[in-house]
Amino acid sequence: MAIDLKNMNVDQLEDLIGRAKARIVEVKEETVNKLREELAAKARAHGYDISDLFGGRGKGGARKAKSPVKPKYRHPGNPDMTWSGRGRQPVWVREALAAGKSLDDLAI
């Protein structure tokens, strides 16, 4: 199937590009679905479910929700302001350290 691109105007070319992109998406989805079915059948043949092998159907598998880290440090004047000790130091921690306090002074 040869397409004569030289005799197509801009609208025809853009339409062709749009249809080609849509077809690419379809082919990729078909390929992924076929491969998923093949892998699931192979897993079943060995007594497994596909989720046993890959942990879910989404990209990267199912992830466990992370629980928040308990705070290790508390602002001496405002107990609502805390810091876990991870990541960047909050301004109040930097200010306390600059004023001569240590992290042990701020520890909970």
Image (cartoon, rainbow, N blue to C red):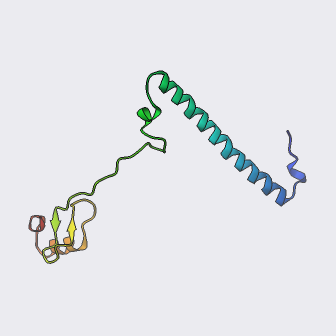
Left or right: residue 21 compared with residue 73? right
Nearest to the observer: residue 17 or residue 7: 17
Quadrant of image for the C terminus: bottom left
Where in the figure is residue 3, as x and y percent of width and height? 86, 45
* Mark count: 0
Quadrant location of the N terminus in the rendered image: top right
Residue 96: x %, y % from top left:
16, 74
Quadrant in which residue 35 is drawn: top right
For the residue pair 17 and 38, the one nearer the viewer reads as 38
* Percent position of residue 30, x then y: 64, 38
Outermost residue, left side: 105
Left-right relation of 90 to 41: left
Between 25 and 62, the one lying in front of the other is 62
> On the rendered structure, is 35 left or right of 64?
right
Residue at (66, 46) in percent of width and height? 25
User: From the viewer's perspective, is 55 left or right of 35?
Assistant: left
Residue 2 sits in quarter: top right
Residue 40 vertical placement versus 98 (above, below): above
View extreme (right): residue: 7
Residue at 14%, 78% in the rendered image = 77
Q: Give the image location of residue 42, x and y in percent.
A: 51, 25
The residue at 85%/50% (across/down) is 5
Q: Quadrant of residue 60?
A: top left
At x 27%, y 57%, the residue is 68
